[in-house]
Image (tube, grey):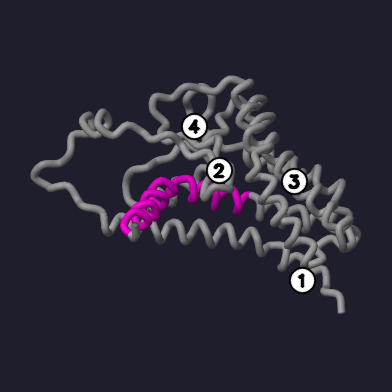
Amino acid sequence: MLATPESFRVRATVPRAFLLFISMAALVATLSARCEAQQPSPNHPPDPGTLKSSNPQPAESKRLFGIIPNYRTSPSLYPYVPMTTAAKFKVASQDAFDRGTFILAALFAGEGQLTNANRSFGQGAAGYGQYLGTSYADFVIGDFMTEGIFPSLLHQDPRYFRDGKGSAWSRLGYAMGQIFWTHNDSGSTGFNYSEVIGNSMAVAISQSYYVDNRTWHDASVKLAEQLGVDMAANILKEFYPEISHKFSRKHREKQ
């Protein structure tokens, strides 16, 4: 028996919920790593200037776990240099056309076909082709809206600037907050219109090819899910250096 439309909505959240789970697991791993890290002596705290010169920021990984595109993450806000319009569209293009984006789209497409999320697409190779095309379109449109078009029009910075200091909980709050609060090209901060309006526009465009999900409820659920996925991605970006270091250290110990 075919599932009801309500069950389609529930099942369609599976991959997004999985990304949220990955991000929460990343936070747990980071907390564990912090507990194991050696603490500096309180009588001889490290000199920030010395640390900065002796420990330069490593090159930013362009793919998290070798799959998730990570072109718009910056290891630090300082010194702040605004992006040009060309640079914003370059980052959007890198994220949209990266092989990892296609892999993610293929995974989302497989899950969509498995749950028959859009019955009009059908099954088989032809149906999967429609799922893949629309899933990839979601990524491309969303990337250009939130990283290129609206940041350029509204003079906002699409990058995620990692905090990298303070407690894990403060960094968690910072990462989540960057969905709604961002940096402007002027160096000031303000509401992240590019993220919210950009994703809203992407969802509105997607209604043209998701013929089975064109209600206001469907659109609002999809927007909330997309903001949640982006929030989870920020958390992952914030803690990824520690996670990567922890796993690479375990790998070296096993050798």
Q: Quadrant of residue 247?
A: bottom left
Question: What separation in Å lies between label 3 and label 2 (alpha carbons)?
Answer: 25 Å
Image spot of residue 129 (x, y percent): 84, 52
Q: Are marks 3 and 2 in contact (CB under 8 Å)?
A: no
Of helix, strand and loop, which one carries label 4? strand
Question: What separation in Å lies between label 4 and label 2 (alpha carbons)?
Answer: 11 Å
Mark 4 residue type: Thr
The residue labelled by disc 1 is 7
Of helix, strand and loop, which one carries label 3? helix
Mark 3 residue type: Tyr
Say which residue appears at 82% left-offset and 66% top-offset.
116
Of helix, strand and loop, which one carries label 2? loop
The residue labelled by disc 4 is 189
Say which residue appears at 28% left-offset and 59% top-offset.
35
What label sits on residue 180 in the rendered view?
2
- Visible in this render: residue 170? no
Mark 1 residue type: Ser
